[in-house]
Image (cartoon, helix red, strand yellow):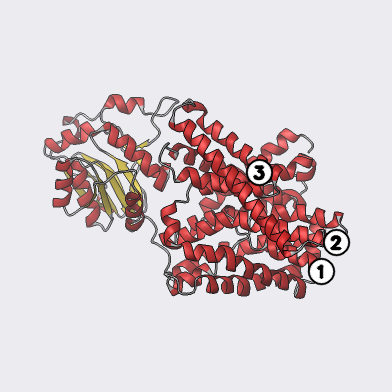
Amino acid sequence: MDNPTVLIAMVLALGIVAQWVATQLKVPSILLLLAVGLAAGPGFGLIDPDDLLGDLLFPVVSMGVGLLLFEGGLGLHKSEFGRWRKVLVRLLSVGVLITGLVGAAAAYYVGGLPARVAAVFGALMTVTGPTVIIPLLRQARLRPRLARVLRWEGITIDAVGATLGVVVLEVVAVEGEGPFQIAAEVASTAVIGTAIGFIMAVVVTRALAHHWVPDHIQNGLILAAVFVAFAVSNELRSEAGLFATTVMGITMANQRRAPVRHVVEFQENLSVMLIGSIFVLLGARVEADSLRDNLLPALGVLAVLVLVARPLAVAVSTWRSNLSRNERMYLGALAPRGIVAASVSALFALRLEANGVEGGADLAAFTFVVVAGSVVIYGLLARPVSRWLHVAVPDPTGVALIGAPAWAVSLGVCLSNVDVAVLVVSTDEEEIEAARRADLLVYNGRLAHRDLVETTEALGVGLALAVSGREELNQFGAERFMALIGRSNVYSLPLSSEERDEAHGGAGGQEVRLFGAGLTNTDLASLLESGAEMVTIARSDLRSPKHGFWPIISTKGGTASVINGGVDEAAEWVIGLQAPITADEVRVS
């Protein structure tokens, strides 16, 4: 197939479909992405990235990685860094040094690579990256503080590792540079990238804070600014762009002059497409013969990196830290390599070959085997090991009630009685007092505060219902919980039939989903006033309720789900309003 439009569409579609299938199968998406890439490339010969994109392949991949680092930086807050500063600094210095030296030694003694190529390989193996760490963190569901350390390391180490790789490449490809020249190159790369990223973040933030940019082009402006920062930094100093985009994201995340929540959501959506496309392209680019010839020695090197390099680097970096023994063990058992290592290795291989360095052709094959192998190993073990070491949080089964009218408080009591955790979020003093009298946990702080994030994580909230009689609380609360637990897990109950009709999808519809079959907040309040009560009944007894019964939530194994049609066959309990009068005596729109 030679049509580039069709091939690009195929890459995008394969990346998204692979991630969707992985979600359904509950396996790390990166495993399927690599498998799809290998099948589409060397397997069936459907996609040849070099023919498709030509000289644009690596610039496109590099800019995609830069954008992913910016998106990752938006999730890094200085309050998290301050507590784990010593651990992170050690991981990014001593840990990187240990990993690089052990990786180089393994490539030389176990893999049989020439010394200079092995040194470059060792530098590349210090990089993990957000493209592999963040999906695995979602899968493993770690304790917040352990997840924060891994997230900070995974995002910031991309820039550090890539810079180290460039420096080592210069040393082995262009002989004669001394230690002072090497140190100067590292410092100049970091300074240039950091300065440009910070300046660009300040400029963009100022533009947003003063409303110089209309809302509908803000995301486009920020996207362009990220690309400009990346390109200018790389033009001034190779790989400085990774520093620029990371620093730009961190700076924007930690300022208070302009809101960036809408930017975060846009970047997260974009990152799904980027991760899928880049991994498919890199998987498709692998040469089958080179991969076959280097497979066994590369697997030996991978074993050394997994069993020796990472545990040793973490043991030294976390010595006498506040992390528990199990957290340190898990940190030492998770270090998948990602896109930066895979993409940069191909560029470095070409540079080594151009300078007549023997063994340069094997560098890309070794790197891909380690990237793919580490993703498979850590992807399969991330969740089981987190449970075995007791560093994972339970699956989210709790329910957040945004607002607490009388019927919602009764609903919360019924949920609590069947062992479902309930969090009431309200700013109304009467509702708060009623919820507390019913022994429900209440959050009445600012919805934008990190306390809500920590409370949601600690309680394991997996479902949110916006049921307040105040439209502004419903809207803001729903938006906040969509960012925390996902859009598909947030439901909103319309105040009236008119609002319900307006919210049934379409371009003008609201963004949160409805629950119930035609019910509104007014209907439920009317039913309660007429003498109805919230009841919990076993699914087996649901065959024929004695009077009018309007099911709202079903529960199974401590997990609650909204009823948007028939009751789930596996449900254990069904909670709803039961009226003491017949159904046709109560008007339900």
Q: Is residue 222 above or below residue 443?
A: above
The reply to whether dot 1 and dot 2 touch (C-beta < 8 Å) is yes
- Image point 17% across, 31% down: which residue? 586
Q: Secondary structure at mark 1?
A: loop
Q: Amino acid at mark 1?
A: Pro
Q: Amino acid at mark 3?
A: Ser
Quadrant into which the C terminus falls: top left
- Image point 74% across, 43% down: which residue? 57
Picture coordinates of residue 21 (x, y %)? 56, 49
Q: Nearer the viewer, mark 2 or mark 3?
A: 3
Q: Residues within 10 Å of mark 1 (few under 14, many from 20)?
A: some
Mark number displayed over residue 268: none
Query: Could you tell which of marks 3 and 1 lies nearer the N-terminus?
Result: 1
Front residue of this view, candidates 218 and 196: 196
Residue designated by label 2: 357
Picture coordinates of residue 535 (x, y %)? 19, 48
Q: Secondary structure at mark 2?
A: loop
Front residue of this view, candidates 507 and 121: 121
The reply to whether dot 3 and dot 1 touch (C-beta < 8 Å) is no
Query: Could you tell which of marks 1 and 2 lies nearer the N-terminus?
Result: 1
Q: Is residue 181 above or below residue 52?
A: below
- Image point 61% across, 40% down: which residue? 229
Front residue of this view, candidates 39 and 390: 390
**Extreme-front residue of the structure:** 180
Quadrant into which the N terminus falls: top right
Residue designated by label 3: 233
Residue designated by label 1: 114
Picture coordinates of residue 190 (x, y %)? 62, 52
Residue 433 in the figure: left or right of residue 11: left
Q: Residues within 10 Å of mark 2 (few under 14, many from 20)?
A: some
Q: Amino acid at mark 2?
A: Val
